[in-house]
Image (tube, grey):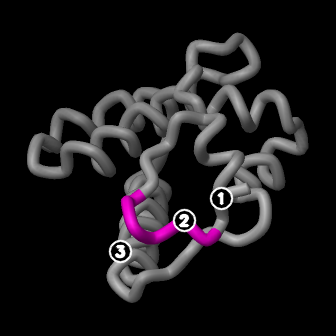
Amino acid sequence: MRWVGRLTHDGSLAERIAQGMIEDPMVGEPERAMLTYVEKLTLRPGEVEREDLEPLRRQGFSDAAIGDIVLNAALFAFMNRIVDGLGGALEGDMRQAAVALGLPLHPGTYEHLEP
């Protein structure tokens, strides 16, 4: 969520986006199309088809921009799997923020962060 806040410069908007509230009026149509696509790519990659790119193109994303979107989503997934695979842990208040947002935490990895 912290990187979302850095991008939006609006903590409450960043929190709503992290909670999946992309219908917020503050989220523009291009961003909503991008977030919808990234959610599918992240959670259901085997279901992504060429037709899923059309909403991005209709919102003005070029093929290069779509490539950037895919690369960034893939890099986040890749890095998260490396950290999880090596038993990495969230630091500071990151665990509490993840719990507050309802994000999944892998059992056995974050107990040292319990209050």
Three-letter residue code for mark 3: Arg
Q: Which mark is residue 111?
A: 2
Residue 24 x %, y %: 66, 14
User: Which portion, as a residue range, is magenta?
Assistant: 106-112
Main structural element of the magenta stretch: helix, strand or loop?
loop
Viewer-side label of 1, 3: 1
- Quick one: which residue is furthest to the bottom in this view? 86
Magenta span contains residue 83: no
Alpha carbon separation for disc pair 1 and 2 = 5 Å
Where disc 1 sits, the SS reads loop
**Residue 29 versus residue 61 in the image, above or below:** above
Quick check: 61 left or right of 95? left
Image point (38%, 83%), residue name: 82
Mark 3: give few (<14), some (14-19) or many (20+) Cα within 10 Å: few
Quick check: 53 left or right of 94? left
Q: Quadrant of residue 63?
A: bottom left
- Reading the image, the residue beneath label 3 is 81
Where disc 3 sits, the SS reads helix
Where disc 2 sits, the SS reads helix
Magenta span contains residue 110: yes
Quadrant where the C terminus sits is: bottom right
- Reading the image, the residue beneath label 1 is 114
Labelled pair 1, 2 in contact (Cβ < 8 Å): yes
Quick check: 72 left or right of 101? left
